[in-house]
Image: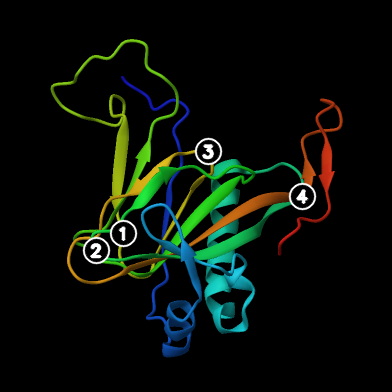
Amino acid sequence: MINNLFPQAVGIYKLGRDLTEKEISFIKGQEKRPNKGNTTSKDNTILRNRPLIKLRDFIETSVADYFKTVYSPQHSVSLRITQSWVNYTEPGQFHHRHAHPNSFVSGVFYPQANQETDRIYFYRDGFQMIDLPPAEWNTWNSKSWWFETGTGDLILFPSHLQHNVEPVQGDQTRISLSFNTFPVGMIGDEVDLTSLHVDNVQGW
């Protein structure tokens, strides 16, 4: 028997509806700034805006479900969104490999993506001293793994997990809405001398 030990939890949630014209127009109409390989919105608290309130509700509900399922915290603690922004990746552009410091769980929602060609890649943590090329890839020997992404998909993952998206194929701009979170409430344990009370998080 081979068991999965200490797996990385990547959550995939579906919006289950089309974005409204108002939501799409607001997301596409943001003022942009340069990023590595693509562009991103100047507004880094995009989910605060009223046109995205229903989308924010879906994201917050999904984050709460992921947090409860994966971490099952003992004390009263929740994840609060700290920053959120939109990425615009034109045909031929890409989203560079990176992680999200100063965040606990991060997420990417796709207002516009091609299910057939768009993928998000995640990478194994740590340096491997011995490198044995496998005859066949699996979840234990792979250095990276990818998931298809389509319009309306939400991907949640631990913020330390490095990830990237390859160049856009075709002629449609890939649009993704990314965000970070941080725990608010009772973190740790009084008896174990690890307790920390976080009452507020700047940015939300």
Looking at marks 4 and 2 on the same chain, the residue that comes earlier in the sequence is marked by 4
Q: How many neighbours does mark 3 have within 10 angstroms: few (below 14), some (14-19), or many (20 or more)?
A: some
Residue 49 found in image quarter: bottom right
Q: Nearer the viewer, mark 3 or mark 2?
A: 3
Is 167 on the left-hand or right-hand side of 185? left
Q: How many neighbours does mark 2 have within 10 angstroms: few (below 14), some (14-19), or many (20 or more)?
A: few
Q: Residue at 55% of width from left, 58% of height from top?
A: 179
Looking at marks 1 and 3 on the same chain, the residue that comes earlier in the sequence is marked by 1
Proximity of marks 1 and 3: CB atoms separated by less than 8 Å = no
SS at badge 3: loop
Q: How many neighbours does mark 1 have within 10 angstroms: few (below 14), some (14-19), or many (20 or more)?
A: many
Is 19 on the left-hand or right-hand side of 142? right
**Tag on residue 76?**
4
Residue sitting nearer the eye, 167 or 202:
167
Q: How far is mark 3 from mark 2, CA to CA? A: 25 Å
Q: Nearer the viewer, mark 1 or mark 4?
A: 1
**Tag on residue 149?**
1
Q: Which residue is mark 3?
A: 160
Looking at marks 3 and 4 on the same chain, the residue that comes earlier in the sequence is marked by 4
Q: Nearer the viewer, mark 3 or mark 4?
A: 3
**Tag on residue 115?**
2
